[in-house]
Amino acid sequence: MLIDVENAFFKFVLIKFKTRAIKKGNKKEMEEKASYFTRFFKKSLENNAFPFTVAVSSLALFFVSQQNFLLFHLFVEVFTTVIAFGIFVIAWSSRRYIDNNFLLILGIGYFFIGVLDLIHMLSYKGMPAFSSYTTDLPTQLWLSARYMEALTFLGALLFLKKDSKSEPRIPTGKSEIIFLSYFFVFALIIMSIFYWKFFPATYIEGGGLTAFKKNSEYIISIIFLISVGLIFWKKERFDSKMVSFLSFALIIKAVSEFLFTEYAGVFDFSNILGHLLKFISFALLYKAVLEIGLMNPYQFLFLDLKKSQAEYRATQSELQRRIEEHLDEAYRHLGTTNRKISLLLEIEENSQKNKNRDEIIEHIVSLAKSASHAKKALLYRSERDGLFSLIAGRGYDEDELKNLKNISFSQANFLKNLMEEKKRINSSCDLFELSYLNHNKKISYFVVLPLIYEKVCAGFLFLGFEKRKSMDAHELEFLDVFSVHASTALARLKVIRKNNNL
């Protein structure tokens, strides 16, 4: 209705602009201005339609209250009761599908809140349904409904876990138990007011509000404000728009309850203002729950599903990123492996074609040093009496190589293990005495590869690393294979032999 009126107004303005444009002879320019004017105000209307409607409606209700308070009260209570029942209908009809338990508890609670408000409206002073009762009756019903409303919000938010994964979902069938629990509380309230009549007095004719009524309104206001804090604390579980609408609604409810501690008569201004704020708070609830629940159900009814889908997409993106990283790493490793295989083939090919023994020895030592990125490399062969003689070296100067010409078990305590186990040795230099091979203390990590010929350790290849503390399994596996190929090539050229004699 409001949109139609605005559209008619804009059409009228556009016609006026066109008429003036024709008279002035500048039709195109004026049509462009009129079109811009129309788009601007339509966009403004779309963005501000809800607050504009609430403001106009509140103003209209205020004027009604000045003419006929009972009619004003009737309008407010009917509107809020319809909203309460609407929240219940949405929650109850979706109870088998929603993953968010907050709406289910809120919906069931608002059914009984709506019933209490409806009885409150019918029992208000001037209504014929409960004419035999005093003004205390509608005030008791009002207070009961507000207590139930505040505690429903608090309970629903406390039940709502901050993390959706840790929240126990209400099983199918348990929603009926929640409904019956609310019905039991509702029945106690009705019986305590109408039958047992031990519900505390809230309003005394000629005396105004009781202390119980005023203190209760303060307590209810505090509960609403605590609920606001819980909404912001658990805002990840809500749509961002819902956080705004719900928090504003609860704050207005808290202010409304505070105003209901001030009036002396049921027609006082503070009572009118309190009902207007109640109207506004329920309008915000309509926007938060019913409009989002009906028009955009995935934003609320299936909020956890929406978040799960977002988490799934994030996990999928992260998984894809990791797969790409692993593929890149695999390609790099494959390229490195191919290069290393080519080095091994190169050793095999040179040892078969090249008969120059010295060149092959130098080539093997150079390849071992460059392939492993070692700082130093030494090639020894086994002689008699536990002595090893130097064949070639890289990374040392000539004087150092002269001092490293021969090495015995006493000078390198790893040699005995190497001869017995015939397996690669790799370790930090701190764990072995390497004063002979590492006299300048520049090597921090070393690898010793045995040169096996006919199941005997006929020599070894020493690799020293300057700034490393370890090597990964792929690098060590390659060095093991490298030592096998190097042993075969050196044995073919009779550099190493079983009897340790050349």
Image: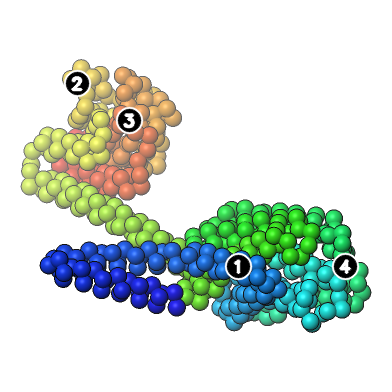
Residue name at image x 15 percent, y 66 percent? 24
Q: Which mark is residue 63?
A: 1
Residue name at image x 66 percent, y 56 percent? 255
Q: Where is residue 288? Give x, y as percent.
A: 54, 67
Q: Are marks 3 and 1 in contact (CB under 8 Å)?
A: no
CA separation in Å, label 4 and label 2: 103 Å
Residue indicated by mark 4 = 199
Mark sitting earlier along the chain (4/2): 4
Q: Quadrant of residue 31?
A: bottom left
Frontmost of labels 1 and 4 is: 1
Mark sitting earlier along the chain (3/1): 1
Q: Report crowding for label 2: few under 14, some 14 to 19, many 20 or more residues within 10 A (C-alpha).
A: few
Mark sitting earlier along the chain (3/4): 4
Residue name at image x 16 percent, y 69 percent? 23
> Could you tell me which secondary element the residue under label 3 belongs to?
loop
Residue type pointed to by label 3:
Lys
Mark sitting earlier along the chain (1/4): 1
Residue indicated by mark 3 = 467
Mark sitting earlier along the chain (1/2): 1
Is residue 73 in view?
no
Frontmost of labels 1 and 2 is: 1
CA separation in Å, label 1 and label 2: 105 Å
283 is higher (above) or lower (below) than 339: below
Q: Quadrant of residue 368?
A: top left
Q: Report crowding for label 4: few under 14, some 14 to 19, many 20 or more residues within 10 A (C-alpha).
A: some
Is 96 in front, or is 406?
96
CA separation in Å, label 1 and label 4: 35 Å
Residue furthest to the top in view is 399
Q: Are marks 1 and 2 in contact (CB under 8 Å)?
A: no
Frontmost of labels 3 and 4 is: 4
> Could you tell me which secondary element the residue under label 2 belongs to?
loop
Is 345 in front, or is 263?
263
